Image: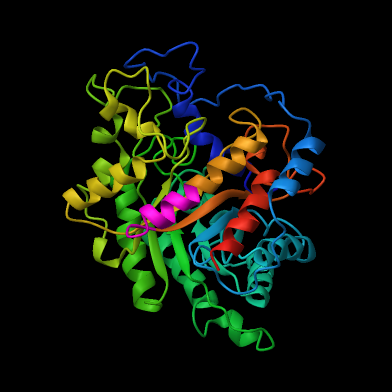
Amino acid sequence: MHFATRRIHASALVIALALVAGASATPAPAKPSLSGWHRVYPVHRAQRTVARTRSVRAARRATPAASPATATSRYGSRIGFASHTDYMSEAEGGALLRRAREIGVTWVREDFGWSWIEGRGKGQFDWTATDRLMRNTSKLGINVLAMAGYAPAWANGGHADDKYPPLNPRDYADFVVAISNRYGRNGAFWNANRDLPQHPLAAIELWNEPWLSTFWKPEPDPGRYASIVRAAAPAIKAAHPEIKVLVSGDLQLGYSDGRDYTNGTHRNWEHGFLARLLKEDFASASVDAYSVHAYSQKFAPYQTSISWFADQSFAQQWLYQRLVLTRNMTREAGKTKPLWNTEFGWSTAGDVDEATQAQYLHDAIQRAVNEWGSFVERSFVYVLEKPHNGDRDGGYNLFHDDMSPKPAWLMLQHQLAASA
């Protein structure tokens, strides 16, 4: 499988949250140490409080059946899935995407892997996986946000691990322009597939979670990330101004050695990735939105405080409503852009039970669209892929392993239909 670590995406923030989101029966210190939060957090699968069959039946009784939503609902134009279908066969990926489209979802965020598209050498492209994705999405009328990462060995200094950034930002810029020229409006892919309805690439996200050493090695570097954005964003806009360009806007910094980068304050957001990026030249005029991953582990979407924290302003960085904190930071820096919440969700393998996953997802979507619609432009539920619920990251899926829907899927179906 191409991205060996792709399933760490949703777990990344779990590492940071683990120290503050423990069981309420054992209060955490007011200012917990974040040492070691970057490591994969060992979690055993939570025992379900309700048997799977019971929860599914209960959800079906509680949720009126919604007819397939082929039209775009008020929520549907803003809600998508962070998905992994381009790793599947075209038929398998198409079937999963069709299920999403039938309930009204019109956006997906998919990996466009530099290391496997241009892995053989500069200018040597293999578009097989992304071609089959775009064939599927064009037929279904689904918009695609391409997550463009990570660097092949020829570009990153010879590292076999593709999470090392490119030595020359221009190489990355050339890659994302190649994506744009192939899948953007009147691109090479559409000219070669005139039998397909032309549904051009909608947006490109520049790297995934560069704030975390797992995805930017050896250590996150906001200045160096700014350099690849500075090369890539204007280049995309010059070639295809209609394509939206997203940069990372997450608050934290995750160093491999667990260093305290906050001058002893633990007020992470004031010294973190976004705070530092906002001080850099990242070609802001060519950027359309900030990508954020608003995971909040066991905390509810409407939760505004953490009871055992003496400093509630410190607590905000761990809650879903840190989207407001993020918006305020960009506004104060004079670099306001819409937020795209490109990964969020709750895992049923360690965070919440299935009924709570459904309720939290409902509330998160409602809050993002109705309360924060002026600045949260889109939200992508993690994850749409072949389910593997035996691990924490797999528990974010809205399907059981037998592909029967969890209550959260049925809730989402009803919520999108009701907003049509």
Q: What's the residue at 68%, 77% (across, down)?
A: 139
Q: Start and end of the magenta stretch?
A: 364-376
Residue 403 appears anywhere in the view: yes
Q: Nearer the viewer, residue 341 or 324?
A: 324
Counting from the top left corner in percent of width and height, residue 177 is at: 44, 70
Magenta residues, dominant SS class: helix
Residue 161 appears anywhere in the view: no
Q: Quadrant of residue 255?
A: top left
Q: What's the residue at 61%, 43% (across, down)?
A: 358
Counting from the top left corner in percent of width and height, residue 123 is at: 53, 68
Q: Nearer the viewer, residue 90 or 81?
A: 81
Q: Quadrant of residue 347?
A: top right
- Residue 116 falls left or right of residue 363: right
Q: What's the residue at 44%, 41% (across, down)?
A: 216
- Residue 69 falls left or right of residue 346: right
Q: Quadrant of residue 396?
A: top right
Q: Nearer the viewer, residue 155 or 301?
A: 301
Image height check: is 254 above or below 188?
above
Counting from the top left corner in percent of width and height, residue 16 is at: 44, 28
Q: How many marks?
A: 0
Image height check: is 318 above or below 290?
above
Q: Is residue 61 magenta?
A: no
Counting from the top left corner in percent of width and height, residue 263 is at: 22, 22
Q: Quadrant of the C terminus?
A: bottom right
Q: Is residue 367 magenta?
A: yes
Q: How is the image coloured?
A: rainbow
